[in-house]
Amino acid sequence: MKRKMILLVIALLLCGSRQILPQAATYSSGNAESLYKELAQAYTLQGKEMSKQEEEKILKTMSTEMKAKFEEIKKLDKNKYYQLLRYGFPYGTGNFGPAGEPAEVYGMLYANDGTKKEKELEIDVELLALKLKNADGSSVQKIKPELAEKLSELFDIKEAQKQKEVQRLEKRLQELKESLQVRKQKKDEIVQRRIQELLGDSKYLKWD
């Protein structure tokens, strides 16, 4: 039983079920049977079919090529198809309106070119992996290099994203260092200004 639980938790992690595991963590080790049953049920629900309306709304935002790939995935593994639709794309609201107000977000709607490219590669990888699982000896040798190529492209994109994040953090760190230096030099002035604010005298420091 313990081995089954470990394997199931690993499966959940691979499927990206971030909402389920924190709940499961509230169980004590003495309640292993309940934990196992709940994880098993949650894993089954991941492949639950979404409504036809939800499905069509997400598919409508995809390119013709991506939709065709999803159809292939659906034929090979229906549960995987719904998992990818349900957990691989946003579906809700976000601040994407013309003036930054909340707007409905789903599928590839509002996705930029970089995000679209990354998502297309992820779907390519999932499709090739499914084909590989169902392939015979001769087909395996053809599919494996294709899968490796797509994974290599996806790796490069993700590494480039990390590099941009590092650059953003480095820039922010430099700004903080400069701010600390200036504030250190002007400590007395800042303290006096804060005193005036606390006493309600800051109005006399306004420009107008």
Image (tube, helix red, strand yellow):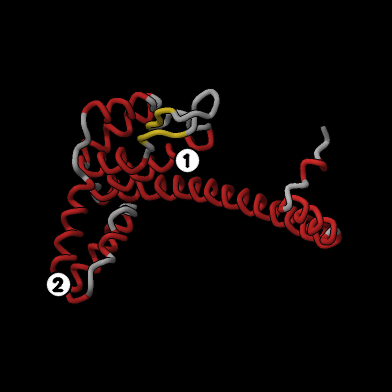
Q: Percent position (x, y) of residue 110?
A: 48, 29
Residue toward you, 152 or 17? 17
Residue toward you, 50 or 175? 175
Q: Residue at x 84, y 56 (%)?
A: 189
Name which residue type carries label 2: Met
Name which residue type carries label 1: Glu
Which labelled disc corresponds to residue 4? none
Q: As displayed, is residue 67 above or below residue 159?
A: above
Q: Percent position (x, y) of residue 13?
A: 32, 58
Q: Are marks 2 and 1 in contact (CB under 8 Å)?
A: no
Query: Of marks 2 and 1, which one's residue comes earlier in the chain?
Result: 2
Answer few, some or many: residues within 10 Å of disc 2's Cα (few below 14, many 20 plus, some between 14 and 19).
few
Q: Locate residue 195 relative to residue 131 in the image: left or right.
A: right
Work out which quarter of the rendered image holds the C terminus and state it. top right
**Residue at numbered disc 2:** 1
Q: Percent position (x, y) of residue 34?
A: 14, 66
**Residue at numbered disc 1:** 118
Residue 55 falls in which quadrant of the image? Answer: top left
Q: As displayed, is residue 2 above or below residue 157?
A: below
Secondary structure of the residue carrying numbered label 2: loop
Residue 94 falls in which quadrant of the image? Answer: top left
Q: Residue at x 26, y 39 (%)?
A: 81
- Camera-near label (2 vs 1) is 2
